[in-house]
Amino acid sequence: MNRTTLSLIAGATALAAVTGFAVLSAPDPTAADDGVEAAAAHLPVERTSLLCPTPSTSDLAETTYTSFTPVTKGAESEGRAALRSATEGRPAAEDAKDGDGDDPAEDGEEAADGEKAADGEEAADGEKAEKPVLEPKEPGKPAVADVSGGEEPALVGTAEGRLAPGWTVQQTTEVAAGLGRGLQGVNCAAPDTEFWFPGASTATERTDYVHLTNPDDSAAVVDIEVYGKDGVLETEAGEGITVRPHSAEPVLLSTLTDEEQTDVTVHVVVRSGRIGAAVQALDNTLGGDWLTASADPAGSLVLPGIPEDATAVRLVAFTPGGVDADLKVRLASPSGLITPAGNETVHVKGGMTTAVDLGDVTRGEAGSLVLTPTGRSVPVVAAVRVLRGKGDNQESAFVPAARPVGLRATSVGNTAEGSTLAVTAPEGTAKIKVTASAGSEGGTPASETYTIKAGTTQHIEAPVPDGVKGTYALTIEPESDGTPVYASRTLSVTDDGLPAFTVQTLPDDRGLVAVPKAEENLSVLQR
């Protein structure tokens, strides 16, 4: 076998290791050349991991987990998936460090010596494992689990085989009253080593937690940096935070600094290991929601899907370097790109958090913010806080800068009423295919194709499965070569006049891995 052949095999193996295990078999002959990776084949991943943060501490919380895997050509014929408590599998010695004096074998559980644990399932060391919170059985159909109260743990999920490509889990919590009342939603995310959260707060009226979840068998060490309007805030308690194996650590942001600031940017950096991270932002009067990480720092950003009835929009931006950034602010409306009067540009000082009130920038039409450099490109992260409602009946949610849809994005937990899909194509006209799955309790899948004109945001009344029962999933697949598409999904519930809602951006679902195409016949051995 010659050097070229060996290099091709090594390249495919390296890509599989970086992005998730891939099925190294023949490429799908039906896969179209999408223009994103012209020299690569896209193969289904074999294994996917997701982390769901602790949903709530409220006794009034009602949480729903919805899981979905799209049917993917070329995927394996068998597979399995499960969401379990993040603490399952923690060594007994770690349990003993909880500091409450409790016996780790309490309630029939035994951490390491082979005696029985909860629910009677066999685990790796002869102990009994807890029953999974959710255990999906097949691609193409959502699986749903409901839990109640404020003692539910963070979850760790793993999907393998046919259930791995594009596996997506939505965590949605309704809190009837009290701090953070309303609708809180978050897509369970893959573990990583760095996260940016512009839009967090240490103000008196806010209670913001940075949720850290460690899925691994070794401890993770994490630094939390906080940047305000004048630069970095002193946060000695934020350095060297240890997140024990198989555990979740909620860190109250206000305990890291004495400074009260309405808008801050939180930077989570993992020194060792890997974690899942998300900010739970709870307001005394404006409800609450999850603030997920912004897209990686970049010169241009897109924040898709600001609801048409937004009554206030606040943009928070931050540039990590020491160089200032000047950004052009535009709204991709249904009719095209427009510049908000009085907010044509925003100046972001290097290393400092900048916040701008954009008011009712959408003026009754759904839109997406598009931020581009006015001159020199400087990496920036950004998010907006959106308010709906008036007076005492107001609710808040966040839209961070998003990654493109890529090859395919997946949204789960949709309902026939209350789900809205927003799609924008800032750089050119794009065509997308939207498929509604079968419902969790019945229904027939349906698909529609839409054209998104250049510079516009389209509020799509997404297709609904025929005879749908329960919730369903939506998959978005761009069909235009080289034209980036950005999307988000808004879930809305009206309860006693309160416009409760939550927004999730829809990046690529990581179901396919790019593997270089071999130009030679690899079955031929060459000297």
Image (cartoon, grey):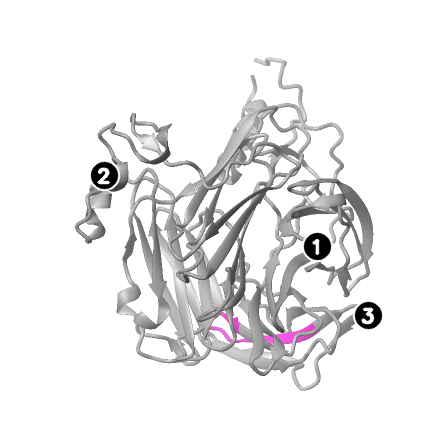
Q: Is label 1 in a helix, a strand or a loop?
A: loop
Question: At label 3, which amino acid type do we have?
Answer: Ser
Q: Residue furthest bottom?
A: 342
Disc 2 crowd, CA 10 A, few/some/many (<14, 14-19, 20+): some
Which residue appears at 48% of the width and 37% of the height?
Answer: 82
Image quarter hosting the C terminus: top right
Quadrant in which residue 384 is drawn:
bottom right
Query: From which residue to which does the magenta span run?
Result: 317-330
Residue 206 included in the magenta stretch of the image: no
Q: Residue furthest left?
A: 101
Residue 381: x and y, percent? 53, 66
CA separation, marks 2 and 1?
Answer: 52 Å
Residue 108: x and y, percent? 26, 36
The numbered mark, 3 or 2, whose residue comes first in the sequence reads 2
Q: Vertically, is 48 above or below 280?
A: above
Quadrant in which residue 460 is drawn:
bottom right
Q: Which mark is residue 251?
A: none
Q: Which mark is residue 335?
A: 3
CA separation, marks 3 and 2?
Answer: 62 Å
Compare residues 262 and 95 and report the one nearer the observer: 95
Question: At label 2, which amino acid type do we have?
Answer: Ala
Q: Is residue 256 visible?
A: no
Q: Vertically, is 63 above or below 317?
A: above
Q: Is label 3 in a helix, a strand or a loop?
A: loop
